Image: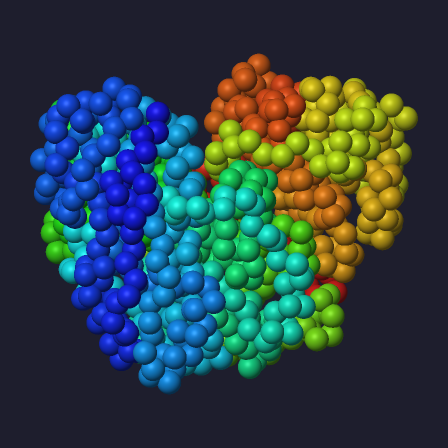
Amino acid sequence: MVIDMGSRNNDVGTLGLQGGKEPITSDEQGEADADSAPAAAVAIVSADLDPTCMDAVANGPDVAAPAGDDLAPSEAASLSNVPGAFAVFPYGALYARERQLEDENAAAAVAAAETNEAVVAPAVHEVEAYAVLNDEEDVIDELQEQLGVATQQLKEARSQLSAPVVEGVPLPPDLPYEGDSRTKRKRVVIGASLLLVSAAVLAGVSIYFIQSGKDSTKPPAAAAAALGAVKERGVLRCGVVPDGLGYSFINEETQVREGFEIDLCKAIAAALLGSSYRYETIGVTPANRFVTLASGAVDLIVASTTHTFERDVHQASAEMGFSFSSPYLYGGLTFGGVPEFVSCADELSAVGDCAGLLICVIPGTTWMDKIKALFPGSNIVAVEEQETTIVGLITGICNVIAGEQVDVPEVTVRYYGYDGPYAMGKNTFSKEPLAIVTRDGDPEFADFVNWVLQGLLHAEARNITMVTADSFAKTGHFGDQFENMFQDALAAVGNYEEIYARNLEYIMPRLKVNMINTGDTGLLYSRPFGQVNTIGPRPVKGGVIESIVERGFLRCGIALPDDQTFAQDLQAEVITGRRVGLDIEFCRALSASVLNGKTDKISFETFPESSGYNNISLALENGDIDVYAGGEVNMHGDVQHPGLSFSEPYFYEVSNGTVGKAFSLATSEDDAQWTDLVYWAIMATVFAEENGIIQTTSNEMPLVKLFGPDLERILRDVIIAVGNYGEMYGRVFDQNVTRVGPNLLNVLPFGPEHYPLPMGDHLADEY
């Protein structure tokens, strides 16, 4: 049930953002943002609702409520004992002036600021308020997605006003960036009562705000390939966290934006544009980051974004899938806050002495997804961004904050002004592999971004530092213009170890999982699935999935050792003692995933291992094979042969005590949907083993709607066909053979997970 609490023009429930304010000069900008924003406070639903009206909300009929003044948290709390009570907090009042800025006015505002001229707030925008009962989960989820759309304009305007283009050594910002600690500190105090919170905390009803008349259609994808576009533009545009200590924040001493993720942006900019690189940082939130990237407003996002199945295939707010780099940071959901309530959260208790547990968490994150599964809605407080969670702790709106190990240490909350008792939880409740995100359909740029990250890891493994950057080998894989890409990236920011030590070590000592794996511990680590019940598009017309279904069988290429031959019929045969047996098992898994569990509908095509990638690339391009099993992952194969896309490795060779070659499934990069299905079929076998799911319990795997209703059993069919990774490995290499090294699972307590993918023999010899 959705109750419309009013119409436009400041009627009940409508938030009219008022224009016509006095001009604000650039010198006054930071002060005015905090000090004068409350003057632009909007009309909201009042606390003057009588119990009868509140009961009507709870029982279902549409109601009308009188408009009134802003409702303070203390006033809202007083409603908690009234049946069906709800409250609305002002949304965006702190930033009402910036929110009014239209896209076409943002550039003019920046230009005006540079000349110290007045910045005038233009058009009025209005926001509708809706009250939704907490048991209306589908409606809440839908409105929560739309909340991201509603906040996007605000964030874009603020970002365009304040994110300067910086070259090599960053320039001092002319305007306070939206994450500027100078203005943020003021806003923590002045705007504490203006937090956007879910009214579910107060009385079992959630309130969401949606921009009136916002078009919810799919945003246009950027037309040009990013690699060439950025080169021509001369500036890399990175979507970043607005204000996250250690990740992306304004250094109070230097007044320069810095952080781990800023350094990754700089590394990619330097690799792409050379030593005189330029980059622009644009603030994004969990609610708008994917829409912002899809629109082409940024070239990539490096904003603490977890790689999930859902986001890979079909992210709901952007209505498209995205490409993810290898993870640059591994973590997991944990808690911090008032010690006694942190213990409650750690023990997943919300009753008795723990009934007062209130957890601040950001909507649109995997954290929120997990917490919604662990706690009742009445224990969850939805806030806009990570710093706001700490504001909630300061004001008492919540007593626990949620985040990853780098988000909730005591040094972070003290930095943002919390001075009460504090403890950090001992347990971890999720896996959060953070990755750099680019748009689907631009594989060259996605490859470039990923190999820059791989280069930073390789440099650490080889002890090549910022000072010795020139000793890193040149590469011609992306063309002569990028032959110094690794040297330029390292000269700009140093290797991975240097980046971590500079930005995060003082907040959270480097966890073992973020160390480089040397070959003696497991590397098999599944990515989280996310919201796989999100309904995605059916198989693409003319795509690989549709072709397999129509012809009724899978065409699978196999890497065959030069000195070996196979019998003609491999449909039911298990090849034991050799990796190729595992390759065949994964072909069977893919057949089952697309063809309703059938494992015998495969046409095998063998390729000599010595034949290289030219024949494989051509076979995939011509449709002679749908997938190539046993593809060796390295930079040479990934980049030098356009058209190939490699899954996560499923088998590693160990040579001289270190990880050597890595093998995966290769597909055509022209079909992102098929490539995604192949990637997650492998992940399914690892996930199943991590969670103790075997062939006979395959129905414990989740149903998936990301590929439409006809393929919702893909994960279950993979497991019922071949079992989990351990079962497959046991069949191929004999149950009695001890499984060691990188082909083991990497589970709690996590061992090193960073593994620099091989560059290729021609480069490896040059270190």
| Residue 311 position in % (x across, y down) | 53, 42
Q: Position of residue 117 (x, y in %)?
A: 34, 82
Q: Position of residue 273 (x, y in %)?
A: 60, 75
Q: Is residue 487 above or below residue 351?
A: below
Q: Is residue 638 above or below residue 136?
A: below
Q: Residue furthest bottom?
A: 115
Check the picture and name the quadrant holding the N terminus.
top left
Count of marks overlaid on the render: 0
Res 424 visible: no
Q: Is residue 483 visible?
A: yes
Coloured how?
Answer: rainbow
Residue under the point 18% across and 38% down: 66
* Occupied quadrant, residue 146: top left
Tell me if residue 493 comes above or below residue 199 in the rendering. below
Relative horizontal placement of residue 540, taking residue 111 as reference (left or right): right
Question: For this view, does 678 lie left or right of residue 172?
Answer: right
Q: Residue furthest top?
A: 696
Left or right of 126 on screen, residue 290? right
- At 29% from the left and 44% from the top, the residue drawn is 14
Which of the 4 quarters of the picture holds residue 113? Answer: bottom left
Judging depth in this view, the residue of 109 and 240 nearest the camera is 109
Q: Residue at x 76, y 31 (%)?
A: 546
Q: Position of residue 388 (x, y in %)?
A: 26, 52
The C terminus lies in which quarter of the figure? Answer: bottom right
Q: Nearer the viewer, residue 382 or 256?
A: 382
746 vs 378, nearest the viewer: 378
Q: Residue at x 28, y 74 (%)?
A: 23
